[in-house]
Image (spheres, helix red, strand yellow):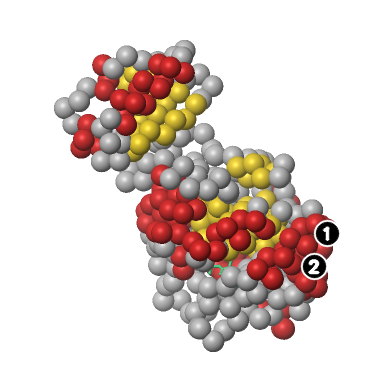
Amino acid sequence: MIVVLKPGLTAEEIHRVVERIESFGLRAHLSEGKERTIIGAIGDERLLVDQTLESFPGVEKVLPILKPYKLVSREFQKTNTIIEVNNHRIGGKRIHVMAGPCSVESRDQVLEAAIPVKEAGGTFLRGGAFKPRTSPYSFQGLAEEGLGYLAHAREVTGLPVITEVLDPRDLDVVCRYTDILQIGARNMQNFKLLTEVGKLNKPVMLKRGMSATIQEFLLSAEYIAAEGNRKIILCERGIRTYESETRNTLDLSAVPVLKQLSHLPVFVDPSHGTGRWDLVTPMALAGIAAGADGLLIEVHSHPELALSDGPQSLKPNKFAALMREARKVAEAIGREI
Ligand code: PEP
Ligand code: MN
């Protein structure tokens, strides 16, 4: 439930309300707005039945949060969450484009993608060093060696890095190299991983599971937020349907739905969403038009040689063309890239 406090309370008075909420075994999450502070009281609300928190000193009113997810809901926070990473503001007016290879393959291969991504106006470098492959015999990634190549490309280009983490045991090493953690579609319901990432003060992109409903997606984000980490970016990357012309069906209506239900930034990944390089640009443009706060795009200098996801990877010149088109769409809806 949402506990709305009276305006102008001292830190001491707020602390007393927090203690009261915690005495029921609930967790108190403070949200300090310009005019007043509200507290999200999270946990088993039945514990509060018959207790009149509303009459506690400093409390103005108590409202239920009707959705099963609480902290990530628009009910809890009306204003959009803005996540600051290396002078970039994710979730604001500017649309951010995170691009780079599916897998990190070598020092040169990462640079051959990172440099043109930077020149074309991309703001983050993506690349997987721990790869969640459907087959155990497929390339599994270069692990820490690959993280080093990403860090090198960050030094050369100045682009902050986003990379996937598969296992809570790898969090220390991945955090040493990356600016944003990525939790992939296959791990959207790896609750142990979500909980551990929730304890960190590191931005995280959570990708929608390939068969997850929007409610399940937001409940996974809630696992992270409930541990304290509220720097969460949601990413629609396509869901599995009976359609076989495309690798997945990119659910673009999820973008405005997520923006209605949650205050978190929403990205679109048209590369995994379609599985086809020729569909990446049209669906990227559609994603922006649908209200996405950013894009995740796979770029490879030689897609035909890529160790993973070559068929959906854009060559650098095609990526630059995408950026030019994307700028026009962004401007048309009052945003910028
Ligand atoms: C990726 O971004 O390379 C990836 C594996 O994506 P997803 O988890 O969406 O399949
Ligand atoms: Mn990929």
Q: Is residue 30 visible?
A: yes
Question: For the residue marked with disc 1, what is the amino acid?
Answer: Val
Q: Name which residue lies at 71% across and 83% down.
A: 304
Residue annotated with mark 1: 156
Crowding at label 2, few (<14), some or many (≥20) Cα neighbours within 10 Å? many
Q: Is residue 281 visible?
A: no
Residue 186 percent across, percent down from the top left? 46, 68
Determine whether the residue tagged by mark 1 lies in a helix, strand or loop. Answer: helix
Report whether 195 appears left or right of 20.
right
Q: Is residue 217 above or below residue 3?
A: below
Q: Is residue 228 above or below residue 302?
A: above
Q: Is residue 90 above or below residue 241?
A: above
Query: Which of these two is toward me, 285 or 275?
Result: 275
Q: Is mark 1 within 8 Å of ligand 1?
A: no
Query: Which of these two is toward me, 315 or 289?
Result: 315
Question: For the residue marked with disc 2, what is the amino acid?
Answer: Leu
Determine whether the residue tagged by mark 2 lies in a helix, strand or loop. Answer: helix
